[in-house]
Image: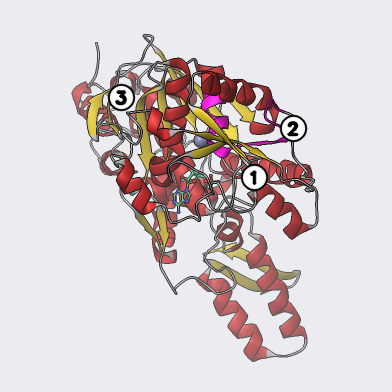
């Protein structure tokens, strides 16, 4: 029996629509990945968490998802348009390393970040530089069909030839022109036209450049996504997602390139996540406005505290980052874990059984089935099965209403507090919900992956120890207070200082 239909807000048309994949039971999904010239900041990571929630919701509904993510390692210019330096070249210069080293280093850092946030890895990771031939081929097709023109510095897409241009952004070309703040490229027929292939200027040697029918150079930024998405998912596929900043230019241009080359619809559902915004002036100076996951870890947070924080806001609303909100998320996540694993819940069943129950359920009824079975299987005070079932149904209704994760989290909390449901059944149902949340609710608090003392706290404790040794009590006390602010306690024991979580 089917649960409530999954409704998704499609940026194309700006309305919620029932989700129906092209092929029954299967979903092709492409998400724009990072430009690997620096660490991802927590704003970028919010978008990847949103996309993970989308994928998990699809899987919870029983769909097999083929998720493709690109790694941009060439062609993304600092202006986000057709002028400025390549971000990768800039990163390499900043760090005095080759572009290839920079790309490998930050790709690895990105993979580590998403693993720490319990984001499921895509089935296909594709690097732009591994798909130069596909990109050249796509540009060639566009040129052959008359959608491209050449200028001295590259090949450009002629937006006037695509009547649908700008439909995703709901901007008319006039609007796009008015909004074009970047320095125009000389000879461009319209400010909205964009580079498909850029030529290396004469006398310049780039670290990354390739031969092409138009001369030595490198691909424009947008072409990689059209080329790789179609290679791995077909010319028309189900879902494409990214941050809202990609609507006006990047995704608008991806559509133009793909649809003009194939004459077919490129993507059926476009989903965009709103931004994480920094509270101005409240951010510590040393961190500036560039906060990474490691910054949070160094301040004593578990990456999953940040994930929890992201779950408290709907993906289409802006989220203002405040340290106090992150602290509140940390407490909430911990107390949820304690409710699940604390006295009464722990020991009712083997963890393997819970994991199996969570893992075996498939389809829209997964939650309801797990709940009912849980209540019956425990042999405790009999409760009417539909009590747990109601939670499961409300959970599914929330997530299927365009990923209303905050509402789903509220259902989970209500369930966690409900004394009318046996602990074992409750745990099983919460672990089932966690297939969407991805909060690792299966790991008891003391075994949390981030439970070890963070480097930042250790460093403060070392400095305090040094201050103590030199009898600088004032400094030692100040450092102890700083450690306490991060949620840790330092005690002086005969074998040296001992740090623990408060
Ligand atoms: P980039 O590496 O610049 O291509 O960005 C990676 C992803 O992060 C893209 O999907 C952007 O839309 C998204 N993004 C950039 N800034 C933010 C932010 N402050 N909040 C949420 N997402 C963002
Ligand atoms: Zn893209």
Residue picked out by circle 1:
36
Is 304 or 355 nearer to us in this picture? Answer: 304
Number of numbered markers: 3
Position in image of residue 151 (x %, y %): 59, 39
Q: Can you say whether 486 is above or below 136 in the image?
A: below
Local crowd size for mark 2, using a 10 Å CA cut-off: few (<14), some (14–19), many (≥20):
some
Give left or right: position of 24 versus 46.
left
**Mark nearer the N terminus (2 vs 1):** 1
Is 438 or 236 nearer to us in this picture? Answer: 236
Residue picked out by circle 3:
371
Residue picked out by circle 2:
210
> Which SS class for mark 3?
helix
Give left or right: position of 55 versus 375.
right
> Which SS class for mark 1?
loop
Is 439 or 282 nearer to us in this picture? Answer: 282
Please report the bounds of the magenta region as a residue range: 212-229
Whether residue 116 is visible to the viewer of this picture, yes or no, is yes
On whether residue 215 falls in the magenta region, the answer is: yes
Q: Can you say whether 176 is above or below 331 in the image?
A: above
């Amino acid at each position: 029996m089917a649960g409530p239909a999954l409704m998704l807000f499609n940026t194309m048309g700006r309305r919620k629509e029932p989700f129906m994949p092209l092929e029954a039971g299967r979903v092709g999904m492409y998400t724009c990945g990072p430009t690997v010239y620096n660490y991802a900041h927590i704003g970028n990571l919010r978008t990847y968490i949103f996309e993970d929630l989308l994928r998990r919701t699809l899987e919870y509904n029983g769909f097999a998802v083929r998720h493709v993510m690109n790694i941009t390692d060439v062609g993304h210019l600092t202006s986000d348009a057709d002028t400025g330096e390549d971000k990768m070249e800039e990163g390499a210069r900043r760090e005095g390393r080759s572009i290839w080293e920079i790309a490998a280093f930050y790709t690895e850092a990105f993979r580590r970040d998403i693993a720490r946030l319990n984001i499921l890895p895509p089935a296909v990771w594709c690097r732009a530089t591994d798909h130069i031939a596909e990109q050249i081929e796509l540009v060639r097709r566009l040129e052959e069909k008359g959608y491209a023109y050449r200028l001295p510095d590259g090949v450009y897409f002629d937006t006037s030839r695509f009547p649908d241009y700008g439909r995703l952004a709901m901007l008319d070309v006039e609007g796009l022109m008015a909004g074009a703040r970047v320095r125009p490229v000389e000879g461009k027929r319209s400010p909205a036209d964009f580079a498909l292939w850029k030529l290396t200027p004469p006398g310049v040697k780039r670290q990354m450049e390739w031969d092409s029918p138009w001369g030595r150079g490198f691909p424009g930024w947008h072409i990689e996504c059209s080329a790789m998405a179609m290679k791995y998912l077909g010319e028309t596929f189900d879902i494409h997602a990214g941050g809202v900043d990609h609507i006006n230019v990047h995704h608008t241009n991806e559509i133009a390139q793909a649809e003009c080359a194939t004459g077919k619809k490129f993507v059926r559902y476009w989903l965009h996540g709103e931004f994480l915004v920094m509270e101005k002036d409240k951010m510590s100076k040393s961190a500036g406005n560039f906060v990474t996951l490691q910054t949070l870890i160094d301040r004593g947070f578990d990456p999953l505290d940040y994930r929890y924080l992201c779950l408290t806001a709907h993906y289409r609303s802006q989220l203002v980052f405040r340290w106090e909100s992150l602290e509140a998320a940390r407490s909430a996540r911990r107390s949820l874990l304690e409710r699940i694993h604390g006295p009464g819940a722990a020991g009712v069943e083997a963890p393997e059984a819970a994991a199996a129950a969570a893992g075996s359920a498939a389809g829209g009824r997964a939650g309801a089935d797990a709940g009912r079975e849980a209540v019956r299987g425990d042999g405790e005070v009999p409760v009417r099965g539909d009590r747990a079932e109601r939670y499961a149904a409300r959970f599914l209704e929330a997530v299927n209403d365009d990923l209303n994760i905050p509402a789903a989290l509220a259902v989970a909390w209500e369930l966690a507090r409900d004394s009318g449901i046996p602990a074992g059944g409750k745990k099983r149902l919460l672990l089932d919900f966690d297939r969407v949340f991805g909060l690792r609710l299966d790991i008891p608090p003391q075994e949390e992956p981030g439970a070890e003392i963070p480097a930042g706290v250790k460093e403060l404790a070392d400095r305090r120890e040094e201050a103590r040794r030199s009898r600088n009590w004032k400094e030692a006390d100040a450092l102890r207070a700083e450690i306490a602010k991060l949620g840790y306690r330092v005690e002086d024991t005969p074998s040296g200082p001992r740090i623990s979580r408060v």
